[in-house]
Image (cartoon, coloured by chain):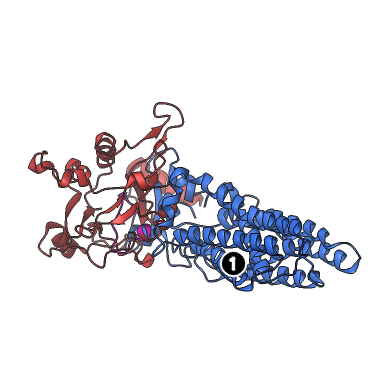
C-alpha cells in the first residue's frame, strides 16, 4: 500500500557532513559496486565502455561554489542520495504499490517486480534520488543498504550502508534518528543539521551538517575585490615607481 | 520536463474522446439510427482507448500496467486508470443498449458522463499534485484540462450529432477553454521555481554562507534525471509553438464553426474544427511539459 505510515518504529538514515566531505566520489563508487553485485537486479549502465556512457546511480556527488558577500568563494562537495523522507511524495504517487515506506525502520524502497516503470515517483521527488534503470526498466533508489544493515553473514563492522563504510573522511554517518542518543541524533543536535528544500514539505530523515565557519584574517578589509597593498620599493625600483607615477 | 510524445498524444486524444463521451452521456442529440450510434461510439471510445493504449508505451513494463489499478487510495495515476476503464465500460454498455433498443438510458448516460469528467480530472491531478513542478501545481491545471476536453469533445459531438446550432456553443466553449489557458500561462510565468521559494540555496542548505552556484556535475555525461527533468531543448521554439497552438487550437476552429454556422454546410464539417483543435492542443501539451521547471534542475545548474 502506497499510503505513508503514520510513524515508524525506527527512522534510519544518514548524516552527511559537508564540512569533512572531500568530494572523492568513493561513496558513490562503492554504492554502485555493492548495488550492482548484491541481491536485487544489477544497477545497470548503457554503453559502459563507449563514448556515450550513461547509467543509474543511487548516490551522486555534486560540487558547488558558495560565494559569501565579503569573502572569497569556497567549494562544497555535496553527496546526494535518497533522504528517506517522512512525507515521501514518491510513495503516495505510485500507482502499483511498488514504492513504499517501511513502518519498522522508515526505509523507502521499490519492489522491483511490481514496478511498471512509469517514472512518476521520480517526478515527485525534488532531490533527484530516483533513477530509471536503463536495462531493467524499473525505478532504482537508495535502499540504505537494507541487505547489509540486517545481514547476519557480514562482519559486524560491515553492517552499515556501503557509502558510510567506505568514506575515507568519515563524512557519512548512519543511525536511528528516533533515538535521541544515537550518533546521528547527537551530530544533528551539536552541529545544527539541516533539511534540504524544506519548502517542499517532504520532511527528510537524512540531515546535512553545514560547513563550519572559515577562519578568516582578523583584518577589517577582507573584501576580495580590494587590491592587496603593494610594498614600497627603494633604490632603482623606487625611482622607477616615482617616475612612472609622475607620468600619470 | 521531457515532453514524451506518448503522454502528449494520450492526454490530448483521450481528453477529446472523453469530452465527447461526457456530452453524449448527458444526452447530446444524435440521430438514432443504429449504424450512426455505432459510429459515435467508435469515435468517442476509440479516441479514449487509443490514448490509453499509447500512454502505456512510455512505461518500462507495459505488461504490468494492470497493477496500476491497486493504489486508488493514495495515487492519482491509479485513480485515473480505474476511472478510465470504468467510464469506457459504462460507455460501451450505454452505446450497445442504445443500438439494441433504439432508446437512450439517462441514468446510465449520467453515470458515463460523470466517469468521463472524473477521468479527465484525475489525469490533470497527476500533474497538478506535483509540488516539484510549481508551474503545474495549481488549481488552474484541472480547469485547463477539463476546458480543453469539453471544447474538443463538443466539436466532435457536434460533427456527429444533431444539436441545434452547435457552432455558437462550440465557439463559446473554445473561448472559455483558452481563457482558462491564458490564465494558466499568466500564472506559470509567475510560478517559476524561485517564486515557489526553491533556489540553489535552499536545495543545498548553503544559503546562510552566500550565493550558491553549481561548479561541477556529478558526471560529465547526462543521466536519467537530466534527460527527464532538466530537459530544455523543447523550449527553443516556445513562442512559435504557442502561436501555433493558438492558431490551430483556437482561431481555425472558431473560423470553421463560424463558416459552418452561417452557411448551409452540414454539421459534419465541424470535424475539421475538431481536427484542427486537436493539432493545436498537441502543441499546447508539448509546451505544458517542455516549459515546466522541475526542482531537481537546481542540483544541475539549470532552471
Q: Which chain is blue?
A: B
The boundaries of the magenta stretch are A72-91
Residue B269 or B287: which is nearer the viewer? B269
The colour applied to the residues of chain A in this rendering is: red
**A207 sits to left or right of A97:** left
Viewed as shown, does residue B11 lie left or right of B177?
left
Q: Is residue A32 above or below residue B48?
A: above
For this rendering, which residue is in front, A205 or B167? B167
- Asked whether residue B59 is in view, the answer is yes
> Is A210 on the left-hand or right-hand side of A223?
left
Q: From what the image shows, is residue B213 above or below residue A137?
A: below
Characterize the local packing of mark 1: few (<14), some (14-19) or many (20 or more) Cα atoms within 10 angstroms: many
Q: What's the chain of the residue with tag 1?
A: B
Q: Is residue A113 magenta?
A: no
Residue plotted at (15% across, 47% down): A150
Residue B180 location, quadrant: bottom right
Q: Which residue ends up furthest to the left in the rendered image?
A: A156
Amino acid at each position: 500500500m502506497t499510503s505513508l505510515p503514520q510513524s515508524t518504529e525506527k527512522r534510519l538514515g544518514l548524516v552527511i557532513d559537508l564540512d569533512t566531505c572531500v568530494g572523492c566520489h568513493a561513496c558513490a563508487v562503492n554504492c554502485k559496486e555493492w548495488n550492482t553485485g548484491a541481491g536485487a537486479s544489477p544497477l545497470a549502465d548503457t554503453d559502459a565502455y563507449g563514448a556515450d556512457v550513461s547509467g543509474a546511480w543511487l548516490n551522486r556527488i555534486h560540487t558547488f561554489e558558495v560565494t559569501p558577500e565579503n569573502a572569497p568563494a569556497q567549494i562544497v562537495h555535496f553527496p546526494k542520495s535518497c533522504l528517506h523522507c517522512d512525507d515521501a511524495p514518491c510513495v503516495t504517487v505510485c500507482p502499483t504499490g511498488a514504492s513504499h515506506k517501511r513502518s519498522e525502520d522508515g526505509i523507502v524502497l521499490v519492489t522491483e517486480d511490481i514496478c511498471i516503470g512509469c517514472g512518476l515517483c521520480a517526478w515527485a521527488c525534488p532531490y533527484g534520488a530516483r533513477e530509471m534503470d536503463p536495462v531493467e526498466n524499473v525505478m532504482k533508489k537508495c535502499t540504505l543498504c537494507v541487505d547489509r544493515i540486517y545481514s547476519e553473514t557480514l562482519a559486524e563492522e560491515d553492517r552499515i550502508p556501503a557509502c558510510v563504510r567506505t568514506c575515507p573522511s568519515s563524512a557519512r554517518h548512519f543511525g536511528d534518528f528516533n533515538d535521541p542518543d544515537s550518533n546521528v541524533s547527537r551530530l544533528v543536535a551539536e552541529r545544527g543539521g539541516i533539511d534540504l528544500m524544506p519548502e517542499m514539505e517532504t520532511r527528510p530523515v537524512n540531515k546535512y551538517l553545514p560547513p563550519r565557519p572559515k577562519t578568516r584574517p582578523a583584518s577589517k578589509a577582507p573584501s576580495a575585490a580590494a587590491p592587496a597593498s603593494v610594498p614600497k620599493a627603494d633604490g632603482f625600483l623606487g625611482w622607477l615607481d616615482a617616475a612612472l607615477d609622475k607620468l600619470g | 520536463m521531457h515532453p514524451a510524445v506518448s503522454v502528449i498524444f494520450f492526454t490530448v486524444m483521450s481528453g477529446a474522446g472523453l469530452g465527447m463521451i461526457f456530452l453524449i452521456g448527458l444526452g447530446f442529440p444524435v440521430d438514432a439510427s443504429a449504424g450512426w450510434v455505432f459510429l459515435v461510439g467508435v469515435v468517442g471510445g476509440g479516441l479514449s482507448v487509443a490514448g490509453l493504449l499509447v500512454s502505456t508505451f512510455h512505461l518500462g513494463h507495459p505488461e504490468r500496467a494492470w497493477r496500476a489499478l491497486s493504489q486508488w487510495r493514495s495515487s492519482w495515476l491509479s485513480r485515473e486508470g480505474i476511472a478510465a476503464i470504468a467510464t469506457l465500460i459504462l460507455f460501451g454498455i450505454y452505446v450497445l443498449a442504445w443500438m439494441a433498443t433504439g432508446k437512450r438510458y439517462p441514468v446510465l448516460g449520467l453515470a458515463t458522463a460523470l466517469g468521463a469528467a472524473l477521468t479527465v480530472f484525475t489525469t490533470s491531478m497527476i500533474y497538478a499534485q506535483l509540488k516539484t513542478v510549481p508551474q503545474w501545481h495549481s488549481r488552474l491545471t484541472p480547469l485547463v484540462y477539463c476546458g480543453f476536453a469539453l471544447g474538443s469533445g463538443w466539436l466532435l459531438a457536434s460533427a456527429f450529432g444533431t444539436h441545434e446550432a452547435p457552432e455558437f456553443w462550440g465557439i463559446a466553449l473554445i473561448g472559455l477553454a483558452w481563457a482558462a489557458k491564458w490564465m494558466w500561462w499568466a500564472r506559470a510565468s509567475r510560478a517559476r521555481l524561485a517564486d515557489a521559494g526553491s533556489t540553489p540555496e535552499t536545495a543545498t542548505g548553503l544559503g546562510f554562507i552566500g550565493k550558491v552556484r553549481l561548479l561541477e556535475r556529478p558526471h560529465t555525461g547526462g543521466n536519467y534525471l537530466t534527460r527527464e527533468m532538466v530537459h530544455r531543448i523543447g523550449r527553443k521554439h516556445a513562442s512559435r509553438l504557442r502561436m501555433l497552438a493558438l492558431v490551430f487550437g483556437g482561431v481555425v476552429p472558431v473560423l470553421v464553426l463560424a463558416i459552418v454556422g452561417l452557411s448551409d454546410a452540414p454539421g459534419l464539417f465541424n470535424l475539421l474544427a475538431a481536427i484542427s483543435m486537436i493539432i493545436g492542443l498537441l502543441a499546447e501539451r508539448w509546451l505544458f511539459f517542455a516549459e515546466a521547471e522541475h526542482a531537481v534542475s537546481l542540483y544541475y545548474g539549470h532552471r
